[in-house]
Image (tube, rainbow, N blue to C red):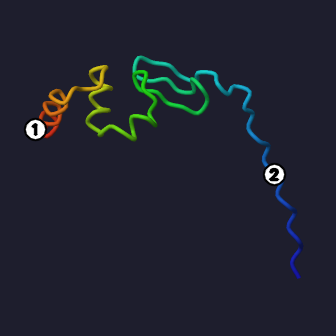
């Protein structure tokens, strides 16, 4: 007969004492400004992920602003040519 295994000790919960403290801040993004969040160039990533195409977000990161329709078309053509 095998011996009973001891019950695993539960892991302590992580502290949330730093919740709301910015964890990182660069010209491109900030992490943890208001908790579990990520901002690209001032835009909440959740918002732009729901409404923008990949190329629009890439343009934002590279050029510092969301593109106009004309800029987006030109940027897509440039990427396609690579």
Image location of residue 82, percent across then percent down: 13, 37
- Horizontally, residue 29 falls left or right of residue 23, namely left
Image location of residue 40, percent across then percent down: 41, 26
Graded by Cα atoms within 10 Å as few (under 14), some (14 to 19) or many (20 or more), the crowding at tag 1 reads few
- Residue under pointer 2: 10
Give me the residue at 69% from left, 25% from top: 18
Image location of residue 66, percent across then percent down: 29, 25
Q: Which mark is residue 81?
A: 1
Graded by Cα atoms within 10 Å as few (under 14), some (14 to 19) or many (20 or more), the crowding at tag 2 reads few
Q: Is residue 55 above or below residue 9?
A: above
Quarter of the image for residue 74 reads top left
User: Looking at the image, which residue sits at the far top?
Assistant: 27
Q: Report helix, strand or loop for mark 1.
A: helix
- Horizontally, residue 27 falls left or right of residue 58, namely right
Give me the residue at 14% from left, 40% from top: 80
- Label count reads 2
Give me the residue at 72% from left, 32% from top: 16
Q: Which mark is residue 59?
A: none
């Amino acid at each position: 007969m095998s011996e009973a295994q001891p019950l695993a000790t539960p892991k302590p919960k992580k502290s949330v004492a730093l919740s709301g403290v910015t964890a990182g801040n660069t010209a491109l993004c900030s992490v943890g400004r208001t908790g579990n969040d990520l901002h690209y160039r001032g835009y909440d990533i959740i918002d732009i992920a729901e409404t923008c195409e990949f190329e629009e977000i890439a343009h934002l990161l590279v050029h510092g602003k969301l593109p106009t329709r004309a800029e987006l078309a030109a940027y897509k053509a440039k990427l396609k040519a690579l």
